[in-house]
Image (cartoon, rainbow, N blue to C red):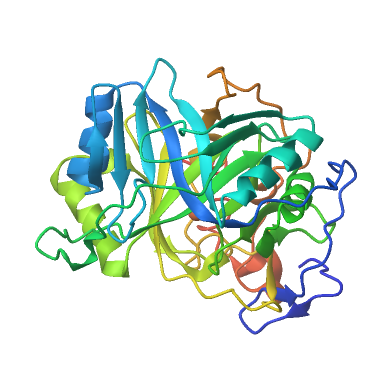
Amino acid sequence: MTNHAGKTLTSSGFYVSQEAPIHTDDPIATPVATPPDILRCAYMELVVTDLAASRQFYVDVLGLYVTEEDDETIYLRSTEEFIHHNLVLRKGELAAVAAFSYRVRTPEDLDRAVEFYTELGCDVRRNQDGFVKGIGDSVRVVDPLGFPYEFFHQSEHVERMSWRYDLHIPGELVRLDHFNQVTPDVPRAVRFMQDLGFRVTEDIQDGEGTVYAAWMRRKPTVHDTAMTGGDGPRMHHVCFATHEKHNILAICDKLGALRRSDAIERGPGRHGVSNAFYLYLRDPDGHRVEIYTQDYYTGDPDNPVVTWDVHDNQRRDWWGNPVVPSWYTDASLVLDLDGNPQPVRARTDSSEMAVTIGADGFSYTRPDEGEESMPEWKQGEYKLGHQL
Ligand SMILES: [Fe+2]
């Protein structure tokens, strides 16, 4: 059990507090310029090495809708989407992420994005015609954390497929829900995202104040992106939402029937963080895709911030199922604006894997009983030496 001073312990086992300024020993200077008013995460541009294999995964298996495609690029969207796409698959030599793209409220917010990132000394490029099909005037930047972002307002509108039940499949993906990014210094990243206008909804900490991960929103859900502590900058996953839990189980059944169960990395399960039902898949290049449903509304200004103890074995899986090591260690490279991979810097704070399932790690089910509240057969799941 750890000490989370200033927070209120709930009967569910996590803590709540009001959002406070995040302390970091290595802050990025807050720009004087006003940040752009971001509406939501809108799409990710992924570089894939085998376009046909990726098309089979995202279209034939997961059922995303093809808005437009050619020999080099496929533009995909989810059921409810009315902008041109939520995912761009672009053929390339190196599997990586070219852009985390956010939609902003007005065209003027693109001027704000230019000012904001120029003041920070970032590489900033603007293309009045858009960097990809279907999207108008856009700004691309590499932020001080090393991530490639895009901001846009104008998009071609396409048909929302919600009413086309004749086309829906049991595992229908209805919305893009969020991104998840890997960064070595989570408080530094969160402070910067707060300057960009994001609000923290949940995080994972220990009693000494080490922050292992944090979830942040613009739209009123648990998140538009999360910062996960690890070697970075890298992309941890991109996430699509279904309407119901049974849609996620249907995806698992379909993957089994197709003898593609090796695409399932973790889950299905119920998250502690976010309360959502989840499944993690790996695409043919190893890019991680989460399928997710039923998190909660977070739009009030005094929405309580949820803090989980890193040793709480229900934080990442409410049923106490272990997190597979690859989920902690693997992530996709991200590119700069010229298409070169960004160098990856090692995390220096303790890793979540080390403090929970590493040699000296521990987890509890019931905090008052400590590690002894885990039966012997469950202690140290995935620790080296515990496998048969
Ligand atoms: Fe996620």
| Residue 213 or residue 351, whichever sits in front | 213
Is 319 located above or below residue 352 in the figure?
below
Is 371 located above or below residue 341 in the figure?
below
Q: In the image, is 181 to the left or to the right of 206?
A: left
- Residue 176, visible in the rendered structure: yes
Residue lying farthest bottom?
11
| Residue 128 or residue 21, whichever sits in front | 128
On the image, the x and y values in percent for residue 371 come to 67, 63
| Residue 250 or residue 165, whichever sits in front | 165
On the image, the x and y values in percent for residue 54 come to 28, 32
Image quadrant where one finds the N terminus: bottom right
Is 216 located above or below residue 344 in the figure?
below
Q: In the image, is 158 to the left or to the right of 211?
A: left
Image quadrant in which you'd find residue 264 = top left
| Residue 222 or residue 2, whichever sits in front | 222
Query: Could you tell me which residue is drawn at 46 percent across and 33 percent down?
Result: 129
Residue lying farthest left?
166
Q: In the image, is 138 to the left or to the right of 145?
A: left
On the image, the x and y values in percent for residue 312 come to 64, 64
On the image, the x and y values in percent for residue 219 come to 55, 64
Query: Could you tell me which residue is drawn at 85 percent across and 57 percent down?
Result: 208
